[in-house]
Amino acid sequence: MRLSELQRKNIINLVDGSFVGRIIDVVIDENGKITDLVLEKGKNKMFFVESSEILIKFEQIKKLGSDVILIENINT
């Protein structure tokens, strides 16, 4: 799977069903493995509110679906 395919998926919190954000980048370790997903949270273009970034450990992914990625244990 390519990063561009991951970036099209919504990230959903499995605990409460809330939308968490979208992937804007990944963190890769020295062995070439993805360790973290960098998410953009709550971008509001209408009021020009700057978005904040959320770092999600790759191990927090519970299900990778065709349209969404389900995660849990998120501290937002």
Image (cartoon, helix red, strand yellow):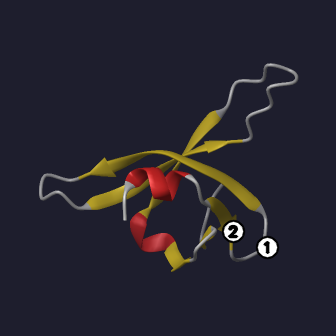
Q: Quadrant of residue 15?
A: bottom right
Who's the residue at 33% across and 48% down the image?
27
The answer to whether mark 1 and mark 2 are in CB contact below 8 A is yes
| Vertical comparison of 7 with 41: above or below | below
Q: Name the residue nearer the viewer: 34 or 67.
A: 67
**Image coordinates for residue 23, horizontal then vertical, percent:** 53, 49
Report the residue that reaches farthest toward the top.
48
Residues under labels 1 and 2: Cα distance?
6 Å
Which residue bears the numbered disc 2? Answer: 13
Which secondary structure lies at badge 1? Answer: loop
Report the residue that reaches farthest toward the left.
31
Residue 75's disc number:
none
**Image coordinates for residue 47, horizontal then vertical, percent:** 87, 21
| Vertical comparison of 49 with 68: above or below | above
Please give left or right for residue 68 compared with residue 59 in the image.
right
The 10 Å Cα crowd at callout 2, few under 14, some 14 to 19, many 20 or more, is some
**Image coordinates for residue 66, horizontal then vertical, percent:** 58, 73
Who's the residue at 43% across and 62% down the image?
57
The 10 Å Cα crowd at callout 1, few under 14, some 14 to 19, many 20 or more, is few
Who's the residue at 37% across and 65% down the image?
1
Who's the residue at 21% across and 53% down the image?
29
| Vertical comparison of 41 with 73: above or below | above
**Image coordinates for residue 48, horizontal then vertical, percent:** 79, 19
Which residue bears the numbered disc 1? Answer: 16
Which secondary structure lies at badge 2? Answer: strand
**Kind of residue at badge 2:** Asn
Report the residue that reaches farthest toward the right.
46
Please give left or right for residue 12 compared with residue 58 in the image.
right
**Kind of residue at badge 1:** Asp
Please give left or right for residue 42 compared with residue 29 in the image.
right
